[in-house]
Amino acid sequence: MNYTIGRLAKAADVHVETVRYYQRRGLLSAPARTTGFRHYTDADVEQLRFIKRAQSIGFTLSEVDTLLALRAKPSCPDTRALAARKLALVEERLRELRRLRRELTAWIDQCDHNPVTAPCPSMERLSA
């Protein structure tokens, strides 16, 4: 099936500007113009969906570029290595978020047990 850029964007559930941005980044090729319009195919719809799915599980566009190269020449060891690196980053981010949760919970507890007229210990901690 042939798509104009607007129909392509709609089929892949993205904005037209997203399509253009991905083309500028080299993630999606821009087909030659015929009759003044670019005509896209089902393969382009699938490529856009692939990009969006990869982003939805945390891959950056630079990493998506690597995934697209791996998609063209599949290699489970390379794909696994990329996924393992991403998982390590996610695990580190989770540790950091847990630390932030503990700190914010402590702030709230301090505020709950502090008289309204006294200086806020949480604010004093930021000043120290």
Image (tube, helix red, strand yellow):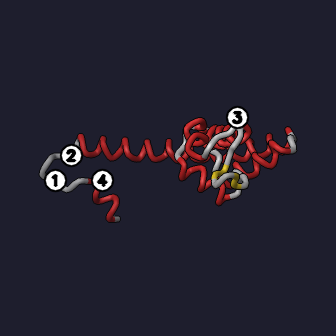
* Circle 2 crowding by C-alpha within 10 Å: few under 14, some 14–19, many from 20: few
Disc 3 and disc 1 in contact, CB within 8 angstroms: no
Where, quadrant-wise, is the N terminus in this rendering?
top right
Sequence-earlier tag: 2 or 3: 3
The residue positioned 25% from the left and 45% from the top of the image is 111
Percent position of residue 95, x then y: 56, 44
Type of residue at label 1? Ala
Return the residue nearer the eye: 122 or 56. 56
**CB contact under 8 Å: marks 2 and 1:** yes
In this rendering, position of residue 106 left or right of residue 69: left
Q: CA distance from mark 1 to mark 4?
A: 11 Å
Give the residue at the far left of this rendering. Answer: 117
- Mark 3 surroundings: few (<14), some (14-19) or many (≥20) residues within 10 A: few
Q: Which mark is residue 1?
A: 3
Quarter where residue 79 is shown: top right
Q: Amino acid at mark 2?
A: Asn
| Residue 114, numbered circle | 2
Marker disc for residue 122: 4
> From the viewer's perspective, is the residue at label 3 or at label 1 nearer?
3
Residue at 41% across, 47% down? 103
Whole-number angstrom distance, CA of label 2 to CA of label 3: 67 Å
Q: Residue furthest bottom?
A: 128
